[in-house]
Image (cartoon, rainbow, N blue to C red):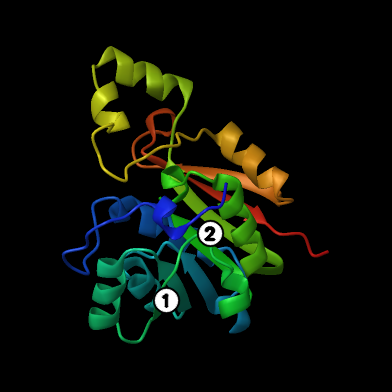
């Protein structure tokens, strides 16, 4: 089966503002970025699934140069209108993005992989976008045994799995399964940060993985 842009999910963005998840996602990403080298070259980030550009805009305040793509026409339109300094384009996690935009020391993808039918294609595109030795920073809602038990006991399973949400979550990742995906694509030094609430009930997790120097 061939992956297409329509498989990436779709959103209607009514504005260019941040959303509730960014309250805990952005500080965590900024902290991770602060641990990486900060030369001019390493300040370049490709954001895969940049939405309305609001996260990219926040990161430019730290001196980062952002290039990003998103399949949502509304998202790209809002980004271009409100953040003209950003390099935001229409595109998906299944496109040959490295051929179009080149390679980067950092690829960032926040809350995207849980929406995709073809996560291996996504991971391959992330790898292709990275320079040798580059870093992937990928977030997704956290799932683990204790959290799933708590959801069940409190009657929150339906709210959490959002079956009635068009273009909603179709993959439910644990640290184990996301680590397996990244290892399959050859990533090394894979680590995780859980964010939002206490770790065992975290809202999201962020995987940090390095592409080998080759």
The residue under the point 44% across, 72% down is 68
On screen, residue 97 versus residue 75, left or right, reads right
For label 2, count other residues whose C-alpha is less than 10 Å away and answer few (under 14), some (14-19) or many (20+).
many
The percent coordinates of residue 156 (x first, y second) are 25, 22
Q: Is residue 104 visible?
A: no
Residue ranking furthest to the top = 153
Q: Is residue 11 visible?
A: yes
Q: Which mark is residue 94?
A: 2
What residue is disc 1 on?
Answer: 62
The residue under the point 29% across, 69% down is 73
Label 2 residue SS: loop
Relative to the observer, which residue lies in front, 22 or 127? 127
Q: Is residue 113 above or below residue 41?
A: above
The percent coordinates of residue 83 (x first, y second) are 29, 81
Residue ranking furthest to the right = 214
Label 1 residue SS: loop
Q: Is residue 79 above or below residue 32?
A: below
């Amino acid at each position: 089966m061939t992956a297409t842009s329509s498989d990436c999910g779709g959103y209607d963005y009514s504005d260019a503002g941040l959303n509730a998840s960014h309250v805990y996602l952005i500080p965590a990403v900024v902290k991770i970025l602060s641990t990486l080298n900060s030369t001019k070259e390493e300040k370049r980030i490709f954001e895969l699934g940049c939405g309305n550009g609001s996260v990219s805009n926040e990161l430019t305040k730290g001196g980062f140069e952002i290039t990003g793509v998103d399949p949502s026409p509304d998202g790209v339109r809002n980004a271009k209108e409100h953040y003209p300094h950003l390099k935001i384009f229409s595109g998906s996690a299944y496109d040959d993005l490295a051929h179009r935009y080149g390679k980067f020391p950092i690829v960032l993808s926040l809350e995207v992989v849980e929406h995709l039918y073809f996560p291996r294609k996504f991971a391959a595109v992330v790898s292709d976008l990275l320079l040798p030795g580059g870093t992937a920073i990928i977030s997704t809602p956290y799932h683990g045994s204790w959290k799933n038990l708590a959801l069940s006991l409190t009657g929150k399973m339906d709210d959490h799995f959002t079956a009635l949400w068009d273009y909603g979550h179709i993959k439910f990742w644990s640290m184990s399964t996301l680590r397996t995906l990244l290892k399959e694509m050859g990533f090394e030094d894979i680590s995780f940060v859980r964010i939002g609430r206490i770790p065992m009930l975290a809202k999201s997790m962020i995987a940090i993985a390095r592409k080998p120097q080759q």
